[in-house]
Amino acid sequence: MSETAKPDWWPLYHEEGSTEFSRIGKDWRTLRVAELEALGHRKRPLLSLIRQNCIDCGGGSEAEVRQCAIARCPFWPYRMNTNPIAAPQSEERRTASGERLRRLRTKQADFAENSPLASSFAAAEASGGVEIAA
Ligand code: SF4
């Protein structure tokens, strides 16, 4: 594909009235999600993106990333896919999270035991799946 045949949204500037593409990247805020996806981007947690970048930086080696000594690199504290600088959760917040999780598990167990839908799903699963008529 020649450069001039690239679509409008190609992430390089196409100067007004010119057939030449600049090497300056487009402002991503002007791109739609589908266009970003067409470029291979997808929604991912930022820590996992940093980790992936570090693995690329380390030549594909996780050991290199673990042993990285470039502590001045802005990614260095986050290279192991964790955020050691994040504020620790308060005891109150941890308790509330645990309570929410307990309530959710109780609801799930209740659904699995008592919902007619759950027993239909279980029966369908046991018989090898559900056929949907066209
Ligand atoms: S912390 Fe910086 S220098 Fe170290 S692996 Fe990650 S990107 Fe590379």
Image (spheres, rainbow, N blue to C red):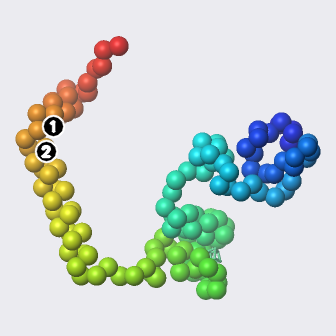
Please, what is the three-letter code of the amino acid marked with disc 1? Ala
Ligand 1 visible in quadrant: bottom right
Q: Which mark is residue 118?
A: 1
Q: Is residue 122 left or right of residue 68?
A: left
Q: Quadrant of residue 9?
A: top right
Picture residue at 87% right of the left edge, 39% below the top = 4
Q: Quickly name the residue at label 2.
A: 111
Quadrant where the image shows the C terminus: top left
Label 1 residue SS: helix
Residue 62: percent from left, percent from top: 55, 69
Q: Is residue 32 visible?
A: yes
Please, what is the three-letter code of the amino acid marked with disc 2? Phe
Image marks 1 and 2: residues in contact by CB distance under 8 Å: yes
Q: Is residue 76 above or below residue 5?
A: below
Mark 1 Cα within 10 Å, few/some/many (few <14, many 20+)? Answer: some
Q: Is residue 63 visible?
A: no
Residue 90: percent from left, percent from top: 28, 82
Mark 2 Cα within 10 Å, few/some/many (few <14, many 20+)? Answer: some
Q: Residue furthest front?
A: 16
Residue 114: percent from left, percent from top: 7, 41
